[in-house]
Amino acid sequence: MFLRFSFVSVLVLSIVEANAELDFNRDVRPILSTNCFSCHGPDQEARKGKLRLDTADGAKKALKPVDDPELIYRIETNDEDDLMPPPDSGHQLTGSQKEVLKRWVAAGAPYDKHWSFQIPRKKIVTGGTNAIDHFVAKGLKEVGLEMSEPADRDTLIRRLTLDLTGLPPTLAEAEQFQKSGDVKKLVDEILASEAFGEHWARMWLDLARYADTKGYEKDRGRNIWRYRDWVIDALNADMPFDQFTTEQLAGDLLPNANVDEILATAFHRNTMENDEGGTDDEEFRVAAVKDRVDTTMQIWMGLTMGCAKCHTHKYDPISIEDYYSFYAFFNQTEDADRGTPVMATPTRSQREEIRDLEMEIKDLDQELKARPEEFQSAFLKWKTKIGEGALWRSLSLRGQETKGTELLQSADGALTAKGELPEKDTWILTFDLPAGQPLTALRLDALTKKAGGKWKDKNVALRELTAELFVDGEKSRKLRLTNPRADFSQKGWEVAKAIDGSTKAGWAFSPMAAAPHVAVFDFDQPVTGGQLRLTLEQEYGQGLIFENFKVSVSNLPPSWLEAEVDAKGGLESVFVTHVYGPTREMSVRLEAARTNLEQVRRAIPQTPIMRELSVNRRRVTKVHRRGNFLDRGEMVSQRLPEMFGSLPEGFPDNRLGVARWLTDPENPLTARVMVNRIWARLFGKGIVETEEDFGMQGAVPTYPDLLDWLAVDYREKGWSLKDLLKTIVMSKTYQQSAKVTPDRLAKDPRNALLSRGARFRLSAEIIRDQALATSGLLTQKLGGPSVMPPQPPGVWKSTYSGEKWKDATGPDRYRRGLYTYLKRTSPYPALTTFDAGSGEVCQIRRIRTNTPLQALITLNDTTFLEAAGALSKKMRSLEHGFRLVLVRSPLRKELVRLQALYSTMEKHYENNLEAAENLLKSAGLNEGNAAMVTVANVLLNLDETLTKP
Amino acid sequence: MNVQYEKVRAQTRRHFFGQAGLGFGALALNQLLAEEKGGVGKGVKIPAKAKSIIYLHMAGSPSQIDLFENKPALTKFHGKDCPEEYLEGKRFAFIKGTPKMMGSVFDYQKRGESGQWVSDLLPGLSSVIDDVCVIRSMNTDQFNHSPAQLLLQTGNPLLGYPSMGSWVNYGLGSENKNLPGFVVLASGGKTPSAGKSLWGSGFLPTLYQGVQCRTDGGDPILYLSDPKGMSREARRKTLDALKDLNEYQNQHIGDPETLTRIAQYELSYRMQMSVPEVMDIGKEPQHVLDLYGAKPGFVSNVETAADPRRLYKGDDPTFANNCVLARRLVENGVRFVQLYDWGWDHHGSSPGESIDETLPIKCQQIDKAIAGLIKDLKQRGLFDETLIVWGGEFGRTPMMQNNVNSVLKPGYYGRDHHPHAFTMWMAGAGIKPGAYGETDDIGYYIGENPVGIRDLQATILHLLGLDPHRFHFSYQGLNQRLIGPTDDGQVIKGILA
């Protein structure tokens, strides 16, 4: 890293020398900021000698006397006590840095507001060239270079497709483009593909610190993938960035916010939560809110607020009061490290299904209510046929054995316990069964208990119900009750438990104990005549026994008999649902639709979202001294950091106002930060290399005018990401060949001036997706819950969390890397080794590394072996295989070398049949050509394959 | 040939090898500093006392009261209510109301010539106690496992910061270019609470993150083994082809990164040899294995158990095996070897996590191994260049934990988390044996010479030859340091030889 900065400073110095004119922001401020501001900057507490050098006023003292300014003496003296920066500070000025400072002081020490805090202006570009090319060509000319020749078509289509969708082009697409050469059309097609949103979502999810678990010790799963899909959809729809911003930061505060707008606020619910036993929820709520503040400033404005949570920032003018005042905006949401609030966030297909089902239910319901023409006469006929009797006939009590309760029967058949209910009892009750038709089912009506009395709880706990049959002269016979159903059961006390042979639980109905309830059981064999003996075990205690109830039986088909409290509609509804053909068919459909709807509704993911506290519950925000949330200082009210003024007139004074302010034309940073970020994804590094820091300590832009032009253009054209990308990729600058020539390497060693096409290792996800796509394994499915592709066993061994990694076997084995389940404390190793993050904190950019561990993955990991296997099957020839991976045709010598490898391996495996079989198995194949698998493995590991062309 | 071109190319290539990081040994800070033109980083490197470090982290945090802190006064109050003054305004993880005081469950003796108190649970350590500096005055400000482990290992209680090992790896690199500079070994059946974040690289390039070497029967390093059916010979042939094809690419495009790629693949091939070799503790003679109590090839059933705690056995050699391995790794030039042993969180609220039953078992697992490690390093002359650190992430309370049992019951003796005072020890390179710091009569607060987490970190960096105050990485506009932004952390001079 040090090395990188030294290259930047060399570059800057060469410009200074070439250009006699000093630019304060470009040439002077970086020197002061790095070497002086930590003691002579904005932080009052750290300030030494009451001198500050970050403002013109503060510096006056050091610039006296005019003919021999103190500042110059201090940097040039040999006296170690006076020398600045002090020798023990670890800072030291170079000769050329001193020279710059001297020239600056000689010119009257002109100050200028830090460049990134000034509102960007668009310089008019004349001559009809693409503005990007205008600025770049000018920069190259200054060092005596010109742009490289355009890349050839095969290279260009591979570059465009990888850059814009994260996937390689197909050969068919490449052949078509080879013929047409129509770049504009190609770009439009690529931008319209769904893979576009998936690819760019990855960038945003790094920023949003998206993960599938909550973090810390338990690191349990969290359902938040609907947010990931929201991002994909928003990007595919090219949602303008100002709207994209507002919905994520404050969608819940929009007037009449819809589900999607609120779902977007899951963005800030990606913060971690600590489920470890014995933790203080407030501590981790505060940590989450601070993370939201830091992340917001980082992503939109490229500024680090983080330092100011403990002390006033040493380099940028952000005070600790600024920090907590801004924090106050975010300190008013309901969430408090406990998972809630969550919201039902149906997917598009769930929403469609629900809409269709609801419509179907409504239609069927209406149709049913209308009753067909013939209905009435058919009903009357039927009623006559089965007799006027109701569905149920209540039974008369013949005998009772209890431990003290006395039951009385009234005329309507209801049984009532006399006097005060005992704490518990078991009743053995005998009833006469009506003779005649065979009886099919038994019904138990739990009627309401009267108010008052000894027992407050009006629930009943029927722990066990058994039935026996007595027929004159015969021994009693146990009756098996089946198909238990009730209109309502208490959780854990479902009616089935009343006939399960155990008294552990039974049928009860809290918290709906005040209402009457019904249970129905079928006799497993129809019963005719005799006496029924029921045993009702109600020994739970606390008076949870029946006070008013009724026992009835029916002789109708059990499927007609539902556990409905109000059986008045009885016969007609049975006729409609079960007997009369036309309505029965509709009823079946209606029932199916209702069940379906219920299932779909239950499957809707619940996503954590932001919700503002009601006015009476709003929190008071105080400064946390030294960042310690237990050490509260002065009270603050919500406002922007002072250096940015206040929220514009008419903006709401809450998160929504902050969100709008971020994309306001007067905001100097957001557009710059965003275009720089997009630029960096395409060119490997930003115009401002320190994407994460646009403050005083950040790098200066290599092409300031270009950055500003892009920023203003992006905003003026309505914040369209697709437009921005198109503007960039249609430039000559982007389309240059990546070939490195001696002259270019000498004059532009790191390609900072863009004298050639950018060439760098592809990202973790692209490397995976490309292998799957070129081999034909890739499952192309948009969105859905995260998946678990193969991972070496034993990687997950997390404390206490019982969750297990289970290698997917179906299509989910080959989804894009974006969908891989991300556990924060144990991320997917094949991705993190290629610098993917763990989603713990906002990751502004991934620092690219090259390690041997990466080579081991693309050579040996199951996914890459299976890709090699599939590719070997797909290859019609060596040349075809080469083109499947790299698009271009191989050079002759490349083909010769592949041929040689193939022959060698063919011989090798002919002599080692068992090894051949094993290799095929490792590559997920039952049969195939092992030698070709090794060739495919090589193709997937070529430098060119792993590198952006 | 264009001389200027070749020169720049070589330079750029070195740049990529160095900065973008080729291999493990390439990126030592001193090498970068040599090329650094500005003043940044000057004075970071200081004379080193230790060449490498073996850090033994007992995840969950062992009870200092039952191992190192002989407190007769506490024993006197055993079973009595804890005085209110110790509870007022304190936050505990699990203790509710007024708990009972609980003296050490085990007996103490004065050990070695130095006469340090060590309980009967650690006879092995007692035999080498004169080589060890016991720090009795550690303290932290975190009282939950995950944040406390993170603070200790990364300098920040939140997730996402570089671990001590990756800092050291970044600053010093590895002495052996075929092995990672920062290796992690875990035992006890679980990874520690904060998971792999404890050896993550945070904002440092991922090159510096810890590489977990596994001893549970799978690949020692993930993906290290060639697939079945791919012999060494076959692999060599495919890599030869890959190398040639990449060489053509280099001729065609001329990007120095292609050369990096070629070297990267060659290094991975060499690693496939060197890692299993160094990981094979079966190569050690029997008497060395016996010194540690190690058993090569042993795979413990706790490693795959859902809850390993009830399965712990005193003769489980997994930790001992890891100690042998640690010695082999530092012998081979690995800079930072981190052992995590899980299962030290003895709350006494369920079986397998008590002071009276589980702590003795855990001690058996580590005690002989640690004594063996110290003796073995000494007999090889490595003790003077290797720093050994032992401890948990915080201490345990002098009171019993009372949220499950209100009275003491065998198998359920437990103590809650205690951040205010606990014990760690250091030994080896640059360390003056003896004792440092003291606690009060009942071991609740520190009596003298408090040592904070940042002091410990500063001391470790110092011994390894990095100035803790100057050693930094510029990120997000700040010079980020392991010891944090303030200068609270200071080298503990009193323990230095």
Image (cartoon, coloured by chain):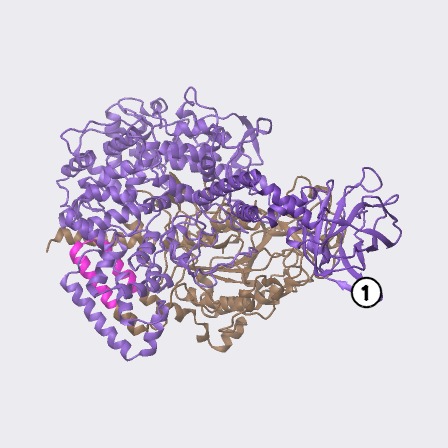
Tell me the colour chain B is drawn in.
Answer: brown
Q: Quadrant of residue A442?
A: bottom right
A400 to the left or right of A690 = right
Q: Which residues are magenta?
A: B239-266
Q: Is residue B260 magenta?
A: yes
Name above or below for residue A417 compared with residue B27: above
Tell me the amino acid under the disc marked 1: Ser
Tell me the colour chain A is drawn in.
Answer: purple
Q: Quadrant of residue A295?
A: top left
- Residue named by callout 1: A476
Q: Is residue B245 magenta?
A: yes
Taken as a whole, is the magenta stretch helix, strand or loop? helix
Circle 1 chain: A
Extreme residue toward the bottom, this view: A911
Q: Residue at x 49, y 69 (%)?
A: B376
Q: Nearer the viewer, residue A84 or A423?
A: A423
